[in-house]
Amino acid sequence: MLIISNDEVRKLLTMKDCMEVLEEAYLERFHQRALSRPRSDLYAPMGEDSYYVFKSMEGVLPKRRVTALRINSDIIKWNRTPHGIRKDKQPLADGNWVGLIALFDMENGKMIAMLPDGVVQGFRVGATGGLAIKYMARQDARTMGLFGAGWQAETQVVSACAARALDYIKVYSPTRQKREEFSQRMSARVGIPVIAVDRPQDAAVGMDIVATTTNSITQVIRPEWISPGTHLSCVKHLELGEDVIAQADCIAVHSHSSVPENYIIGQGERCIYGQDPNEQGEHQASESGWESAVELHTLMGAGAGAGGRQNDGQISCFINNIGLGLQFAAVGALVHRLAREQGLGIQLPDSWFTEDVHP
Amino acid sequence: MLIISNDEVRKLLTMKDCMEVLEEAYLERFHQRALSRPRSDLYAPMGEDSYYVFKSMEGVLPKRRVTALRINSDIIKWNRTPHGIRKDKQPLADGNWVGLIALFDMENGKMIAMLPDGVVQGFRVGATGGLAIKYMARQDARTMGLFGAGWQAETQVVSACAARALDYIKVYSPTRQKREEFSQRMSARVGIPVIAVDRPQDAAVGMDIVATTTNSITQVIRPEWISPGTHLSCVKHLELGEDVIAQADCIAVHSHSSVPENYIIGQGERCIYGQDPNEQGEHQASESGWESAVELHTLMGAGAGAGGRQNDGQISCFINNIGLGLQFAAVGALVHRLAREQGLGIQLPDSWFTEDVHP
């Protein structure tokens, strides 16, 4: 059993490899040879808009012999800010958060690795956005506008550069210092200009790709900023907003299993689909019904005729509406293989995690 | 983060303590201050009646500040034997099985312990049967007949002795050697005669309590063997059979959330309730509708008037129809507390299981 750290994951993973293994996993999904369990979220009220939340999801990828379990054990607070309502995960574990991926070998059942989910999480969201660009954006897309300057923005920049030969990227985030630091850091990392802009519209108008990668759950762009031929991308549909999504000629979602199963203490033991204790419309059904748009893996397996871009004048839109356990199986299997090959990680005795007592 | 072994759990747990913490947890459940997520089972075909199966369930117990995740990573084979169809978990992890409990501290999110589930599993099933005896059997019950001589039979003997002052126990299991060894071992352990009998009816006729604790999924007793006033108990309702259950005047089940959520590779991504790939009626709805009988925790919280035994002539029946994550939270919290107090377990750095990257 290998304990792998975020630093080691950073050393091991490249966005290119990550996109490759995810592409393979999505094709396995297309052929019904892989599986994900929709995320379940358990909520226990802890007072003052605060909840203990335990999230879990799994992915099964027989081709790579791996099942992944991803868990998050969070104390979450809902905060009202000038920029909208934000869910904030409190870092109460000695100043840290608790998100873990456990990997299991499907041929013998063993837990083969445990690692924090943070870096993998960024990679898989970024890589998925990158694959959506690969399959949905115009072939000649050269520019990207980005909303947000956090970790999700970071991986989105890297994966967009892996999917298309971009000339430059513009980034907007409400805090000047944050966007300027992001600009410097990311320009150095991807080797093209990543330009911080002072007005949100400057990161949208005339851009070939517009990606929102914030943790806001209110709209951050306006429909009039989007031109024909643009590819839109978001990590939460509320960032784009219904009127922006309505402009798209073709839409793809990440998964139709888009609603976590919520269990809330005090509200019976039943599963409450699409409603968390501080529901802000995050999982309400849309007016336009974009939730039933084609899934990304279908575009990959069946081609653009299944609902993708038909010409360069269309606006395409990818809504990364929810994660899949399968992503953690695909990326986790890669991390584990590379860690073994390169001798990274801390090896713990397998016997600690198996038993001679029949379970 | 504490790694605890089955041997240490054996040293730490007593059936009496285990029944106490479970009783507390069931009362928390009654007051809607605790929560369990129904088990989800993911199936991946591995050829020849064999499946890789990943099971998970959780329990949230704020009173003890603990959330427990229980996972099983199994290669399961369905075998036909002279005594019926058996699901066999293959010990392919260096000859061992893989069942784990992870415990989380709800005030800071940390994973505080990981331990194999085998010994806890036995204790919680046994303790639950014992609590059902405490709340449902006649006060003057003095004898028990037992079917099965495996680990579930073992803990059932101990918990029955904790719930009632029994004079003797009779045990039947198809293999002579197994039942005789069980008889010797358990007589020594509980200090009353545990008598191996050669015919199944001898473990049922005239007994005050009749418990089936086998891994058979076909009926092991007959209705004419059961007398008025008996308390019946089973770990799978198929062991008792519909005609035996139909004789009961009062029935309690462990939980109404009795059907695991199955996800099966190749059968779409939807959840298939009550059907596993080799469905043998284990989760088919009963003709008598016993599934909707009162839940054990309701008898505890609301009293026997809620559906329990009304007089000594009645036949009562407890159907331990499915486990609850909550049991692992209650027993896990106890194991963790005792291990800390007694300095048992292997301490791993918390920092391996937290992260400074926002998840």
Image (cartoon, coloured by chain):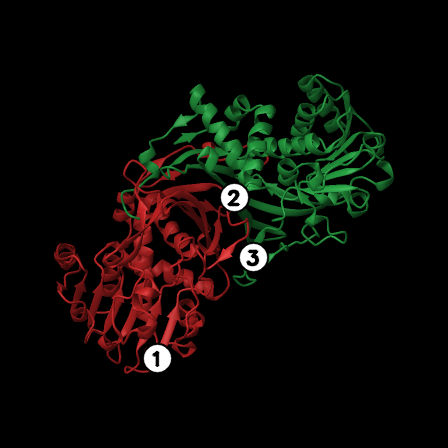
Chain colours: A green, B red
The image quarter containing residue B18 is: bottom left
Q: Which mark is residue A264?
A: 3
Closer to us: B221 or B28? B221
Q: Which is in the foreground here, disc 2 or disc 3?
A: 2
Residue B230 lies, with reference to residue B121, above or below; the image says: below
Q: Which is in the foreground here, disc 1 or disc 2?
A: 2
The residue that label 2 is drawn on is A35
- Separation of marks 2 and 3 at Cα, in angstroms: 26 Å
The residue that label 1 is drawn on is B249
**Residue A217 visible in the picture:** no
**Residue A196 visible in the picture:** yes
Where in the figure is residue A181, as x and y percent of width and height?
Answer: 72, 24
Closer to us: A316 or B156? A316
Q: Residue flagged by tag 2: what amino acid is it?
A: Leu
Query: Viewed as shown, does residue A78 lie left or right of A65?
Result: right
Mark 1, chain letter?
A: B
The image quarter containing residue B154 is: bottom left
Closer to us: B251 or B279? B279
- The secondary structure type at the circle numbered 3 is strand
Where in the figure is residue B342, as x and y percent of width and height?
Answer: 30, 43
Q: Are marks 1 and 3 in contact (CB under 8 Å)?
A: no
The quarter of the rendered structure image containing the N terminus of chain A is top left
